[in-house]
Image: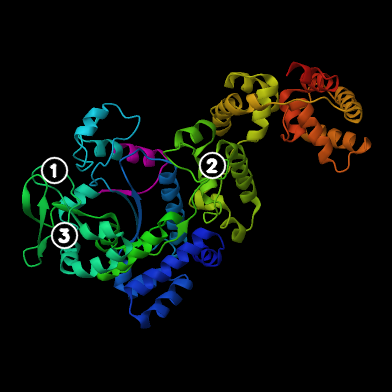
Amino acid sequence: MLQNLETLARDAKSWPFEQARNLLTHVLKKRLAAGDVATARALIDAGKADEALAAFPDLQRPVVLETGYGPSGLPHMGTFGEVARTTMVRNAFRALTGDHWPTRLVAFSDDMDGLRKVPEGIPNPEMLAEDLHKPLTVVRDPFGTHDSFGAHNNARLRAFLDGFGFDYEFMSSTQTYRSGRFDAVLLTLLARFDAVQAIMLPTLGEERRATYSPFLPVSPATGHVLQVPTLSRDVEAGTITFDDPAAGKTTVPVIGGHVKLQWKPDWAMRWVALDVDYEMSGKDLIESVRESSKVCRALGGTPPEGFNYELFLDVEGKKISKSKGNGLTMEQWLRYGTPESLSWYMFQSPKSAKSLHFNVIPRAIDDYLAAIEAYKTQEPAKRIDNAVWSIHAGEPPTHTSPVSFALLLNLVGVANASSKAQLWAYFAKYLPEATPENEPLLDQLMERALNYYEDFVRPSKSYRLPDDKEKAALLDLAGRLKALPADTTDGELIQGEVYAVGKEHGFEPLRGWFGALYEVLLGASQGPRFGSFAAIYGLSQTVQLIEAGAQGELASQA
């Protein structure tokens, strides 16, 4: 079975497996002599990764995947997307190598950066204003809950990642610099200062070039992270000298947390010091990846494998900007959608620009539910490319929600429901054994449907009058449903009557008939499978709804 999974992973077409195969190629080339790469790859492709690791000890080091976080603000949608997608690649890599190969996912917080401006909407802004330019882990916490602003935001990041069940190792820039873990590479950069400058200076404007140094010393006098030129350096002593605005000419060691690096050299230094094998980033950082990769090579390292994902757009197709507030926050998505639906959305076409707005949530929920149902009957080669394999690390749930989110939204509207208790009452006949305890996802979706309907659907409802043809068909359907047993909960039986009426009244194609049902009865251009909706709402109530729509009462009340 394990070997079969490895074979499936080798042939899988979805992007996480493409990335996993690229990562495997990268690691083999990085760690082995050219003549050994083909031998190791042949063993792995034959499902013998354990033999490859035994034959080549350098392969036994963990494969390191990294994601980065700037803790001057709180975790956001991009944070989730990067960790979720990197986790999908990690899961695919494990499948490809039979999980013999150890892997690590490092969530790195760049918390030694100086605070450049006071974020909006933060309490005690005057406190932060006093601490500007100090490292985030020195800036006082305006919330009063942690030792520093950086520590507060790091705690929020970890709680955020833990809440989604991510498997990761947290790493603080401040702690890592101070611990000495970066010292060896920092000393290498000091020795190769001119080579790094030769890479970075051509990318800068004339004014910035005149003062640029890859080293940002922390002022012993003020604690500020300084952007000042390096006046001189002593490679043997491991020090740099600079002009401190508060103390004049000052010399500090480049190790032990006395300096940090500008972010592009810092990124490159981390890749070398942490032996990073994979890191993805947004399309806006393509040039930064290229420059950091050059610095990485200058430091004697190998840049990691990775890819650039597209950025999200708002509902008007404009780039999302935190300053404009035209995006969608994590809290907003989770008010209306489930975490799994967000993972589903992140999985889809990461190299294509997509709208990230409230209107994508219902479809994402129902597409995720449909993928779970499809997975149950798919052959193994299809299953491994199904998004739910990547979302759930190869073990998607066997049961989700018995009804769609679209159906729940329409049920909320037609029933004028304002609580989950009212919705559960409608399910008493349709699913008599169902309870919030044994159908937890349905219970969660009910809460989100109530929220979504109230905030977005109700304000946009638009009922219309039926034309004569539609009115006759609606009254015919009402009569047919009256003839069915009053207690029927057979959605397929009801759906059959709906189809029969549409055909007998000459609706070609039939979607015109279903469109009329949705627009006249539900006030929307789209809707759920009508038979299932009627079975849950109740036959007699559905008949009353159809008759009211046929007589124009719903349109007149709107």
Quick one: quadrant of the C terminus? Answer: top right
Q: Secondary structure at mark 2?
A: loop
Depth check: give the residue in front, 375 or 478.
Answer: 478
Mark whose residue sits in front, 3 or 1: 1
Q: Secondary structure at mark 1?
A: loop
Magenta segment: 155-172
Say which label, 3 or 1, has the lower sequence index.
3
- Residue at image x 55%, y 49%? 388
- Which residue is at the far front? 206
Magenta region includes residue 164? yes
Q: Which mark is residue 314?
A: 2
Residue 29 visible to an observer of this rendering: yes
Mark whose residue sits in front, 3 or 2: 2
Depth check: give the residue in front, 256 or 340.
Answer: 256
Q: Secondary structure at mark 3?
A: helix
Mark 3 to mark 1 CA distance (whole Å): 20 Å
Residue type beneath disc 2: Asp
Residue type beneath disc 3: Asp
Say which label, 3 or 2, has the lower sequence index.
3
Category of crowding for the residue at label 2, using alpha-carbon neighbours closer than 10 angstroms: few (below 14), some (14–19), many (at least 20): some
Residue 338 coordinates in the image, percent (x, y): 52, 37
Q: Using residue 63 as the reference point, say whether residue 380 is left or right of it.
A: right
Mark 3 to mark 2 CA distance (whole Å): 43 Å
Mark 3 touching mark 1, by CB under 8 A?
no
- Residue at image x 64%, y 24%? 458
Q: Name the residue beneath numbered marker 3.
A: 183
Category of crowding for the residue at label 1, using alpha-carbon neighbours closer than 10 angstroms: few (below 14), some (14–19), many (at least 20): some
Total numbered labels placed on residues in the image: 3
